[in-house]
Amino acid sequence: MNSEVNIKYVLGLEEQAGKTLQIVKIDIPQSSDIIEELEAMQENPNKNLYDMSSYFYHYVNPIEDCYNYCLPEEYYKSYLNEQVSSVPKEIPYWEYRKIETERRTTWERRLFKKEELSQQELEQQWKEYVHKVEYSDKKRYCSKAKKYILCQNLYMAISEAEAESNLNIKIYSHDIVGFNHIIYDIDDDVKVRVDTNFGYGPTSSYFFLTIKYKDIILIPYSDLVHFYYASMKSLIAHTKSYSCNRDSWRELMEYVSNFVNKSRHNPESFVRDYVLNEIHIMMEGLREIINNPKEALEQISTIYQGNVRLSTLRPFTKNEFQLYETTKEEITSIFKIEKISGALHFIENLKSLKVLCSEVDSVIDKIIELNKSVAPEIHSILESIDVSIQPIQEEIDNLNKELDKKITEKEGLENRLEYILSYWNQRSDEAKKKREERFKRQYPRYEIVAKEISDLNDKIFPLKKYVESRKKLRKRLTNCNDIMNSYIQ
C-alpha cells in the first residue's frame, strides 16, 4: 500500500473564484503512536488481551460500529464486502478472567498422558500454551484495531470534506466497498459522474469517469485502437476507465480539473476539439489496422503489456497470447475485423454530435465503408473454424462413447465391492481394508479400468479445450457479423 491517498490525506476538487477547480489535500489524522503501542503490546509477553483492549478504548473513541471501507486492502481485492472494519470488542476484566478459565479447560482436555508429567512439566506446558494462545488472540485484536483506526481516521477526514464549511469541495476520494457514485454538475450543460465498485475482484471491480455535454457522453473513441481488448459496452458509456487503485484518484481529478478549467469559458468549442481529436486518433488507428493489421497488433501488445490491466481495457491475456502464437494469421484477421466492426458501436453517439461537429457525417460514412471492405473475410474464417472443429469433435464423441463403457464397467465393479463390504460393517477398518485388497486381486479389472478412464479423460480434455477455444473465436466473429449486418445494406 504505497499510495498516500486516503492514507495520509483525502484528495478533493475545490471550486475556486472564477469557477475553476483546484486539487486540494485534506489531511487524515494519524494515530501512529497508538498503533505503535498496540504493536508493542502484541509482542510484549507481559501484556495480555485485557491490557490491549483497555488501551484501545482509553485512547480511541469509536464513532461508528463499523466502516464499509477497503482499507487497508487494495480496491481490486475480492470479498472486501465480507471484511467490513467493525470496532474491536471491549473486554472487561471479568470477561478476560472467564477467557482464562476457558483456556485452562481446553488445555486440560487436550493434554496427552497428563499422569506421566511432573508438576513442573505441567506448569511449563501450561505457560507455553497460554503464551501461544494469548499471542494469537492479541495478534487478531491488534490487526482489527489498526484497521478500525485507519478507517475511522479516513471517516473523520471525509466528514470534514463533506462539512458545510467545505461546500466548495465538489469531488473527494473515498474507499467505499461496493457500488457508489458521485455527481457534480459544472453548469447546466456539463456534468461529471464518478462510478466505482471496489472490493469485488479484478474482473468485477471498476472505476469510471463520465463527462456529459448537453446529455451527450464524451466517449474515448481512441481507446478502441489503443488496446487489444476494449469493452464496447464500457466505451460507449464512460469517458475514462481507471485502474482500481488509490493513485487513480489523482489521475481522475487532474483530468476533471483540466477539462473544467479549459472548458469553462467556451465549453462548446473545447468539447468540439476534444471529440474531433479522439475521432481523428481512432480513424488513423483503424486505417493502420486495415493496412498493416499484424504490425498494429504487435504494437498494441508490446506497448500495453506492462500496464495495470483494467476489466474493460487490456492487452493480451496469457491464454490469448498463447493462442496468437499458434494461429497468428487467423487471430490477426479477427483482431482487424473486431476493431473495424467495433467502431460501428459509436455511430449512434456520433449522430448525436452533429449539433457540435458537422464533420461526423463523413466519419460515419468512412466507418461503414471500412466495414464493407472487411465483411467478406468473415465467411471464409468461419468456414475455416468449422472445418477445424468437425474432425476433433468426432474424435471427442468416439472417445466419450468408449469412456461411457468404461465408467459403466467400473460402476458395476464398485457396486460388487460395496455389496461385499456391507457384510464387513462390524469389522475393523484394517479387516475391511484387507478384504478390499483381496477383491482387487480377484478382479484386476477394477484398477485397470480406473486407469483406462483416467487416460481417456487425459485425451479428451485438451481436445475439448481446443474446440472451446475455436467456438469462442467463432462467437467473436458472429458478433462482428451481427453488428455489421445492422449497418451494412
Image (spheres, rainbow, N blue to C red):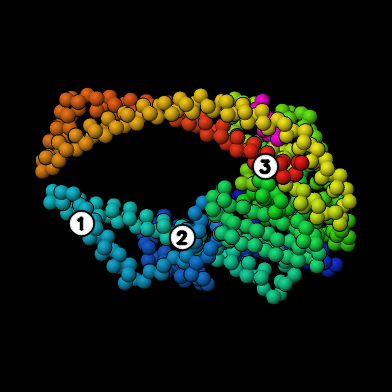
Q: Residue at x 38, y 69 (%)?
A: 91
Q: How far is disc 3 from disc 1 in space, using C-alphas?
A: 72 Å
Task: Look at discs 3 and 1 and give the one toward the viewer.
Answer: 3
As drawn, the label of residue 482 is 3
Where residue 318 sits, quadrant-wise, is top right
Q: Which residue is mark 1?
A: 108
Q: Position of residue 174 (x, y in %)?
A: 62, 61
Disc 2 target residue: 144
Q: Earlier in the sequence, mark 3 or mark 1?
A: 1
Whole-percent x and y of residue 379?
67, 31
Q: What secondary structure is marked by label 2? A: helix
Q: Residues within 10 Å of mark 2 (few under 14, many from 20)?
A: some
Amino acid residing under circle 3: Asp
Indicate the secondary structure of the residue bearing disc 1: helix
Q: Main secondary structure of the magenta part?
A: helix
Which stretch did the figure color magenta? 329-337
Identify which residue is drawn at 15% across, 28% down. 438
x, y (%) of residue 122? 20, 53
Q: Where is residue 139 drawn, in percent x and y?
A: 41, 56
Calculate the distance from the C-alpha at mark 2 to the C-alpha at mark 3.
53 Å
Which residue: 51% across, 51% down?
78
Identify the image quadrant of residue 195. Answer: bottom right
Depicted 97 relative to depicted 445: above or below: below
Mark pair 1, 2: CA separation: 29 Å
Query: Is residue 454 among the parts visible in the rendering?
Result: no
Residue type at mark 1: give it: Glu
